[in-house]
Structure formats: structure tokens, C-alpha cells
Image (tube, rainbow, N blue to C red):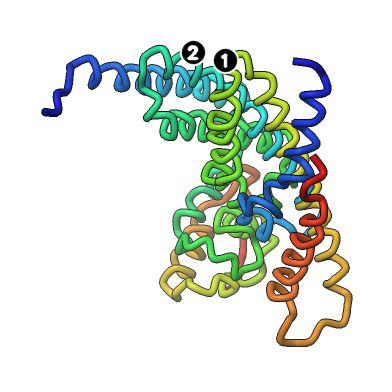
């Protein structure tokens, strides 16, 4: 008959939990030390993109495309092939209504 | 263990049992990040960093935590935990100190987490080295990982250089892009078969 001791259940739990806690704390510390200030709009625009990471726009993933839009490198939102009109409009409206840290507004075509 | 053992381990892992061309691990970044040789070298450096440190840490965890408690069966999930944390760390470092490289690696950088080459080396160290040497094989494991990572970097760099040349060469329409690259990868793999049996 198969018997399961309490120890056999608890030990792996504690080992993995302890490792996770240690590594997590280490990463939290590293994130604090290596913090980079980024434009808050970039994150919002990435959120508004479809998020397929298909690469059809020519950027490596949606994060790169979103950054490109906010930095004014991207000329047309329709480079994003899976994007629909509603996605493009949402991004254009958001960028129109939100000026950057330097007070400038990003203009981008559909 | 003498230096010859380490040298042989590096040479063996780098050229004879090359991780990409012989063991077919880590193919995703091999095909994904090999369009430009500069980003290929960056990818190789990131993989080297993660692979060497991950091998060291996973070997230590296996021999000093998992074996004493008799819970070797959770090695895979414990190793993934270590690798994922290291990749997060590399991502932060690159974002802080090398923005262009961070951009050119894109989605392939977080994907190192699921790169089978790294887990493959960590698990291979356990099954090949730990079973023979026990916890004293730690440095051998680290040098094996270093050799594997150097082999990965060498091959991804060579492959990206070939792909850069292919861009400007006259390839038939149906073969342009990925198909001809896959043929190149196959020929490289056959070429490396010639190193078989040296050691």
C-alpha cells in the first residue's frame, strides 16, 4: 500500500517556497537598484495594442512597437496587422489627450 | 581534477557535442535572433551569462539541498525557478545598461527562460557529472556549461554571418528568407558531424 508521510509533503513545499522567497527578494532588490525611468505612456500604448507579438510591424514584439509609437518612429499604426480600427482609434485618442513629460503631443496616422 | 579535464570538457561541449548542431537544443533563438550578427552576439552573451550561473546554482542546490532531503524529483521545477530569476536579472541589467541590445533582442530575451538549452545543460550536468563525481564535480559542471555556452555563441554568430551574406546574394524566390536559412543550418550540422569521434 502507498503511504504518504507528512514530511514528504512538507519538505518540498518548504524548499521550493524558501527558494522562491529568496530569489524573489533578490529580484526585488535588483529591480530597485537597476530601475529605469520610462515614459508612462509607453506602457499604456502597449496595453492598447492587440498583444500577439507577431512581429508583422517589423519590431521585435508589441513592446518595441509601442515604444516606437511614443517615440515618434512609427509613421502608421496600420503596420500592426492584427490591429483593428477600434485599436488604432483608442491609441490615437489616448496620445492626443495625454502630453508627454516634456509637454509635447505625439501625432500618428492610422 | 586537473586542468586537462576542464579543457577537455570545454572542447567537448563547445565543438564536438555542440548544443545547437548536435543536440538540437536552443533552436528558437538560433533561428529568431540570427538576422543581424550584432544581436546574435548579444544573445550569445546573455545565454552565456545565464547558462554558467544557472549551472553553478542548480548544481549546488541539487547536491546540498535536494539530495540531502531526498527530493530529487522536484529538480526540474527548482531549476526552472533559478533560470527564470536569472533571466529577469539579465533583462533588468540590459534595460539599464544597453538599451539598443535590449530592443534588438525583444521578446527573445524573456524567452531564454524557456530555452531548452539552459535547462538541458543543468539537467545534463546532473545526469552525466553528478552521478559520477557527486558534489565534487561542481567546477566540471560549470566548465561544461561555459563550453556549451561558447559553442552556442560561436554557432549563432557563424549562422548570422551567413544569413547576412545571404541577404545580398541571388537566392531563388521560393527559397528566400527562412527556407534557405534552414538549409544552411542543416549543412552546418552535417559539417560538425565531421568532428565526431575525436575524443
| Residue closer to the observer: B20 or B39 | B20
Question: Quarter of the image containing the C terminus of chain A?
Answer: bottom right
Q: Secondary structure at mark 2?
A: helix
Q: Circle 2 sits on which residue?
A: B64
| Residue closer to the observer: A20 or B187 | B187
Circle on res. B188: none
Q: Residues within 10 Å of mark 2 (few under 14, many from 20)?
A: few
Q: Position of residue B128 (x, y in %)?
A: 59, 31
In this view, the residue farthest toward the left is: A1
Q: Circle 1 sits on which residue?
A: B135
Task: From the viewer's perspective, tell me whether residue A98 is left or right of residue B15.
Answer: left
From what the image shows, is residue B122 above or below residue B32?
above
From what the image shows, is residue B61 above or below residue A97?
above
Q: Quadrant of residue B46?
A: top right
Is label 2 in contact with label 1 (beta carbons under 8 Å)?
yes
Q: Residue at x 57, y 35 (%)?
A: B124
Q: Position of residue B111 (x, y in %)?
A: 56, 47
Q: Residue at x 53, y 58 (%)?
A: A95
Amino acid at each position: 500500500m502507498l503511504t504518504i508521510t507528512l514530511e514528504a509533503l512538507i519538505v518540498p513545499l518548504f524548499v521550493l517556497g524558501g527558494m522562491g522567497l529568496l530569489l524573489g527578494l533578490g529580484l526585488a532588490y535588483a529591480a530597485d537598484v537597476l530601475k529605469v525611468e520610462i515614459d508612462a505612456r509607453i506602457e499604456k500604448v502597449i496595453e492598447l495594442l492587440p498583444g500577439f507579438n507577431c512581429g508583422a510591424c517589423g519590431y521585435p514584439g508589441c513592446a518595441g512597437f509601442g515604444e516606437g509609437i511614443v517615440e515618434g518612429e512609427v509613421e502608421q499604426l496600420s503596420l500592426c496587422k492584427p490591429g483593428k480600427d477600434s485599436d488604432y482609434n483608442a491609441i490615437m485618442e489616448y496620445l492626443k489627450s495625454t502630453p508627454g513629460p516634456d509637454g509635447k503631443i505625439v501625432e500618428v496616422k492610422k | 581534477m586537473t586542468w586537462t579535464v576542464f579543457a577537455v570538457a570545454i572542447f567537448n561541449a563547445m565543438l564536438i557535442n555542440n548544443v545547437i548542431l548536435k543536440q538540437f537544443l536552443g533552436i528558437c533563438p538560433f533561428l529568431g535572433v540570427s538576422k543581424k550578427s550584432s544581436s546574435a552576439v548579444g544573445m550569445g552573451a546573455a545565454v552565456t551569462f545565464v547558462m554558467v550561473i544557472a549551472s553553478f546554482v542548480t548544481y549546488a542546490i541539487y547536491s546540498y539541498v535536494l539530495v540531502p532531503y531526498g527530493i530529487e524529483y522536484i529538480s526540474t521545477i527548482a531549476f526552472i525557478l533559478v533560470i527564470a530569476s536569472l533571466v529577469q536579472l539579465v533583462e533588468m541589467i540590459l534595460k539599464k545598461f544597453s538599451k539598443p541590445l535590449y530592443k534588438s533582442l525583444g521578446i527573445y530575451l524573456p524567452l531564454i527562460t524557456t530555452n531548452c538549452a539552459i535547462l538541458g545543460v543543468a539537467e545534463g550536468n546532473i545526469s552525466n557529472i553528478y552521478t559520477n563525481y557527486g558534489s565534487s564535480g561542481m567546477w566540471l559542471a560549470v566548465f561544461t556549461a561555459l563550453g556549451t555556452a561558447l559553442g552556442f555563441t560561436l554557432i549563432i554568430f557563424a549562422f548570422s554571418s551567413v544569413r547576412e551574406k545571404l541577404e545580398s546574394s541571388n537566392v531563388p524566390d521560393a527559397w528566400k528568407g527562412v527556407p534557405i536559412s534552414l538549409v544552411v543550418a542543416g549543412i552546418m550540422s552535417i559539417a560538425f558531424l565531421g568532428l565526431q569521434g575525436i575524443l
